[in-house]
């Protein structure tokens, strides 16, 4: 069975940031589902989502939220799947620290793998790596992605060296 990644977020206002997780999963050839679930505003829906995630064939859940970002931790409390939390810098946030700390500072026994503020792309890559641990095709796609990234840096390094750094600033 091909494993999928679940992408959820607390509000449609998180979609711009969270779509970066979906984009990178597409690049890496990983199937995903994406929806809006809120611990605060739709608690029953969150319960249903988290408790049925494993039987729907998900390998990992990427959960993004801003402000009092309880969604990733609450979902993690109800599933044995790994949950990757994305602190979103929402409109009324305290510079994003509110969401960072509420996702990062989980009590012992209920881990959420927390990425950087608005770090949805890295959350997607991490989720793909979880899928890639048991899916050779996805693992190969990740290796190609890493090689392309390395090649880009090496090309830019030689351009800076050969053409002079002044042309590059
Ligand atoms: N942190 C949560 C949760 C939750 O944790 O359940 N539900 C919505 N929110 C967040 O509230 C912010 C503002 O939402 P609105 O823009 O809808 O007012 C969003 O960043 C969302 O993730």
Image: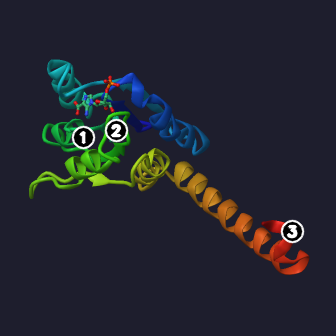
| Residue 140 occupies quadrant | bottom right
Indicate if the residue with disc 2 has its beta carbon within 8 Å of ligand 1.
Answer: yes
Residue located at (73% from left, 64% from top): 152
Indicate if the residue with disc 3 has its beta carbon within 8 Å of ligand 1.
Answer: no
Q: Quadrant of the C terminus?
A: bottom right
| Residue 120 occupies quadrant | top left
The residue tagged 1 is 72
Numbered-mark total: 3
Residue located at (18% from left, 39% from top): 79
Q: What colour scheme governs how the chains and residues are painted in the rendered image of this protein?
A: rainbow
The residue tagged 3 is 167
User: Residue at the right extreme?
Assistant: 163
Q: Secondary structure at mark 3?
A: helix
**Which quadrant of the render holds ligand 1?**
top left
Q: Is 116 rendered above or below residue 89? A: below
Q: Is 154 rendered above or below residue 101? A: below
Indicate if the residue with disc 1 has its beta carbon within 8 Å of ligand 1.
Answer: yes
Determine whether, in the image, residue 144 is placed left or right of residue 163: left
Residue 62 image point, x, y percent: 36, 41
The residue tagged 2 is 64
Dot 1: within a 10 Å radius of its alpha carbon, few (fewer than 14), some, or many (20 or more) residues? many
Comparing 79 with 119, the one in front is 119
Labels 2 and 1 touching (C-beta < 8 A): yes
Residue 132 image point, x, y percent: 46, 52
């Amino acid at each position: 069975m091909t494993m999928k990644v679940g992408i959820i977020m607390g509000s449609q206002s998180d979609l711009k940031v969270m779509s970066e997780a979906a984009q990178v999963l597409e690049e890496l050839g990983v199937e995903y589902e994406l929806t809006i679930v809120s611990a605060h505003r739709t608690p029953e829906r969150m319960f249903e989502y988290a408790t049925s995630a494993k039987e729907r064939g998900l390998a990992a859940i990427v959960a993004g939220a801003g402000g009092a970002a309880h969604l990733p931790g609450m979902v993690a409390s109800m599933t044995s799947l790994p949950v990757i939390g994305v602190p979103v810098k929402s409109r009324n946030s305290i510079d994003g620290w509110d969401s960072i700390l509420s996702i990062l500072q989980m009590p012992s026994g209920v881990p959420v793998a927390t990425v950087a503020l608005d770090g949805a792309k890295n959350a997607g890559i991490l989720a793909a790596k979880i899928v890639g641990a048991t899916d050779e095709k996805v693992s190969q796609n990740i290796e190609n992605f890493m090689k392309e990234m390395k090649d880009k840096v090496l090309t830019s390094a030689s351009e800076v060296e050969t053409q002079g750094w002044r042309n590059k600033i």
